[in-house]
Image (cartoon, grey):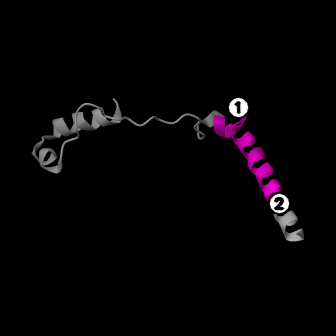
Amino acid sequence: MSEDNDLQLLLKELVDRVKSLEAMVYSTDNILMKSGLVKTETQTPFIQTGSALPDADMIAKMDWTELDDMVKKINGE
């Protein structure tokens, strides 16, 4: 029973420490946040609907401008 209590106390301490570190990192006064090294918003993935992506044979027959346009569409540009 003592081992369970010790383990539970250790887990509580670890959770509290992680929460304090998260609060420190995401604080607006933090130098990391001000410098832009911490991102709070990430890009949303682009899901193409309606048309299928080209297969390897179609890609092999494309010229560089078509490939560039396809990559821009995939990136959502």
Q: Quadrant of residue 69?
A: top left
Query: Residue 75: x percent and y percent?
Result: 34, 35
Q: Which residue is mark 1?
A: 28
Residues marked 1 and 2 touching at CB (< 8 Å) = no
Label 1 crowd (10 A; few <14 / some 14-19 / many >=20): few
Q: How many marks?
A: 2
User: What mark, if any, has residue 54 been given in the picture?
Assistant: none
Label 2 crowd (10 A; few <14 / some 14-19 / many >=20): few
Residue sitting at 16 percent across and 40 percent down? 64
Q: Quadrant of the C terminus?
A: top left
Q: Which residue is mark 2?
A: 8
Query: Residue 56: x percent and y percent?
Result: 17, 50
Compared to residue 1, the image places residue 51 above or below, namely above
Q: Quadrant of the N terminus?
A: bottom right
Q: Quadrant of residue 12?
A: bottom right
**Is 22 inside the magenta-drawn segment?**
yes
Q: Which residues are magenta?
A: 9-33
Give the residue type at disc 2. Answer: Gln
How far is disc 1 from disc 2 in space, using C-alphas? 32 Å
Q: Earlier in the sequence, mark 1 or mark 2?
A: 2
Give the residue type at disc 1. Answer: Thr
Nearest the eye: 39 or 35: 39
Query: Residue 10: x percent and y percent?
Result: 82, 61
Q: Is residue 9 left or right of residue 37?
A: right
**In this view, the mark in front (1 or 2):** 2
Residue sitting at 41 percent across and 37 percent down? 45
Q: Secondary structure at mark 2?
A: helix
Q: Secondary structure at mark 1?
A: loop
Residue sitting at 37 percent across and 35 percent down? 46
Query: Residue 43: x percent and y percent?
Result: 47, 35
Most common SS among magenta residues: helix
Q: Residue furthest right?
A: 2
